[in-house]
Amino acid sequence: MTTATVAEPGLGARLGKLLRSRETSIFIALAVVVVATTIANPAFLFSSDGWRDLLLTPAIVAVVAIGQAVVIITRSVDLSVGSMVGLTAYLVGTLFVAMPGFPIPLMFLVGIAFGAVLGLINGALVAFGKVPAMVITLGTLYAFRGINVAWTGSNRINASDMPDDFLALGTQSMLGIPTLTVVAVAILLVVAWYMRNTRGGREFYAIGSDPAAAELYGLAKTRRVLVAFVGSGAASGLAGVLFAARYGTINSQVGDGFELQAIGAAVIGGVAIVGGSGTVLGAVFGAYLLLTINRALPVLGIPDFWQRAVVGTLIIGAIVLDRVLAVRQSRRLLQERTSA
Amino acid sequence: MEIATQTPTLELRDVSKSFGSVVALRNGQLAMYPGSIHALVGENGAGKSTLVKIIAGLYSRDTGSLELEGEAVEFRTTAEAKAAGIAVIYQEPTLFPDLSVTENVFMGRQPTGRFGRIDRAAMRAEVIELMQRLGVDIDPDRPAEGLSIADQQIIEIAKAISLDAKALIMDEPTAALSGVEVERLFAVARSLRDEGRALLFISHRFDEVFALCDTVTVMRDGSYVSTEPIAATDVPSIVRMMVGRDVNELFPKEPAEIGDPVLEVSGLTQPGMFQDISFTVRSGEIVALAGLVGAGRSEVARAVFGVDPYASGSVSVLGRALRGGNPAEAMKQGIALVPEDRRKQGLVIDATVASNISDAIRHTLTRFGLITRSRENTAAQFWARRLEVKTAALDAVAGTLSGGNQQKVVLAKWLATNPTVLIIDEPTRGIDVGTKSEVHRMMSQLAGRGLAILMISSELPEVLGMADRVLVMREGRLTADIPRERATAELVMFAATHAAEEVA
């Protein structure tokens, strides 16, 4: 039997757990990258734009990664997030062109709702069609992008087409923290709380951990999977609105490649690709690490074409690390049992 | 009897269930009373598991009635059955490996506070209390991964108690437990009984049935046979009711000349799977490997063929030792393995009959590394004809054939390799009665031609009818080696449920 500590784990034990957690190690890795790059070039952190870019640039991908992480935790994957970001961003631009006085808060709601509808299409096909999410969302990745290209053509929406107040959101700060980052953090807090503390959140983990057991427990699997995809769509929709506000220029290729960044962020952040474990906080840290490395490599003078290789190595490293840790854990748990 | 005046906690009458043309349950009857531990016994395939799955809400019944405390109920999902107070503990517990013990106990019905926030402290406290009550020491915060089967079952029971189940069904809970763990489980079961819950205990171990239960229901071939108080019956009469049919007519093995040893296995051991397995199969001989599901028979077969590794022991064919863990080598030495799960392991279900039959002899059909359809067909034709595979064309997709014909295709594939040893796992599972005898005739002919056959079977009539010798396994060990003349259903059943020293 296990050496059970029936008492509530003490402060020391909790602290130890916190220090050993994946989130902590990713955060440390992020700090190391920032410090190393800043030593090489102090402007990376200490210029007026440096601090802002550090927090701002990854925020949009981080929002997408939050939705993606929830989907991966349920043992699915959403490849269409980039296309949903693009489509929503263009919708936002088009609406502003047509109705320059469109209320900005309402625009956020429109973007989120539109993304949610796109996510519902994914979710319904996966949950009811019983087709692997990989295939469905690969299809919608191309389908959504195709619609975007057909709709946009060679057209482009420029900053001058959008209200100044809206664009200001992309550059403003609140107490030294960029507004968009505040939005991302708010989303993170809500989703992290939900995933940790509610039945619905825990059921995502259960379904990803063992779908057959979830069936026997009588969990509403279909509904949960649907919710996960709607959530991922809504997060992508929000990211589309944020993208429009931040960059002001929207063509038919917005969000291209976000799917791989979001999945990469989740995996680096400790979300197991086979589902059942990991946190959205980890995914957000993963997004920050991934994009900060992207920005740091040129500063450190690493040639352009090596940058992707570094990112790839990071992802593979994260997966190998996960595997090693999983094997070690299951061996330890087995040993505890046999030695009892 | 006093007990009959009570309302049963759970009662099933005339329940039936078919899957396509296969009748899994003809006439299920069961009445579980509060404060009673009811045993349900029967051979593999008697319909016990189907009955349980109907109660649990996993299957919907075709006919019959299901009453909970006197009221008709209908469970469409497991959640509904659970909400009504029915807890089922499956032979292999179903927990979420990534989640903590506490979460596993409460998943889907966690206590919540404001904003739907789960009350972790309350959950944890209740689990600690449950574990204390069950007399076990399991850390409520550890993940379920790596827990022993016994501990996992305790968690399932904790789940059942915390949902205050009226009826608790345990499907072969002791199959994987050691003596101490069984005792612990029994103590828990008795205390639940004393609280007035109704328990159903499915087991193949008669000693346990007699030690724990007060009533026993026997099933056979998907039908109810009888229900009796345990005090009014004994092991031989239960076995008679379980077997209860003429077993020697259906499967005539024609006499074959039994020659020299072909397959020799000695001291084969893989910890946790099987221990010290030694036997020989001679040419022309059919040796049955009997025992209950989970006794380790298929594992032995897989180890002999080299699919799975083994820690110690040796396998030799015609006197030549075989390296373990290498199926290609086993094939080269003339072993063929027809696996239990045809659809998953025996066939490429979406490929044609011809390509399936020629699968194992691919390398002999290639010319300059290429295979032509016509060469494949020529090779397949021969075997398809010999085994009378009933399909319009060789290019029919294997998945569209009936179970019996699929089995013939798998057999044809292996016979095409011209083996000297044929290991065949559950040769007639899921095959209708007519085709069954064809498969048996075929095996008999093969033995007549000097093949050494090792047949794993859970069907007693098949074992008794086909085998020249019956080896019986129980919990990873051989418990008996019975020659054809002495083999009876009772003897085999006894050996399958008792340790070797008791059998001898």
Image (tube, rainbow, N blue to C red):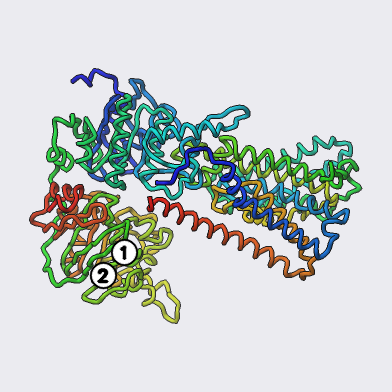
- Could you say which disc has been placed on residue B315 in the image? 2
Whichever of labels 1 and 2 marks the residue nearer the N terminus, that label is 1
Marks 1 and 2, Cα distance to the nearest angstrom? 9 Å
Residue at 71% x, 43% y: name it.
Answer: A115
Q: What residue is drawn where x is 18% and y is 20%?
A: B1
Residue B218: image x %, image y %? 21, 36
Horizontal side of B295 relative to A97 (left or right) equals left
Q: Amino acid at mark 1?
A: Ala
Q: Is B452 in front, or is A316?
A: A316
- Label 2 neighbourhood size at 10 Å, few (<14), some (14-19), many (20+)? many
- Residue situated in front as seen by the camera: A122 or B7: B7
x and y percentages locating residue B30 in the rendered image: 27, 30
The chain containing the residue under callout 2 comes to B
The residue positioned 33% from the left and 57% from the top of the image is: B406
**x and y percent of residue B317 in the render?**
24, 73
Q: Is residue B107 left or right of residue A123?
A: left
| Residue A138 sits in quarter | bottom right
| Residue A312, disc | none
Residues at marks 1 and 2 touching, judged by CB atoms closer than 8 Å: yes
B270 displayed left or right of A194? left
Under tag 1, what secondary structure? Answer: helix
Q: Secondary structure at mark 2?
A: strand
Q: Is residue B151 above or below residue A260?
A: above
- Tag of residue B303: 1
Q: In the displayed orientation, state which residue is furthest to the bottom.
A: B368
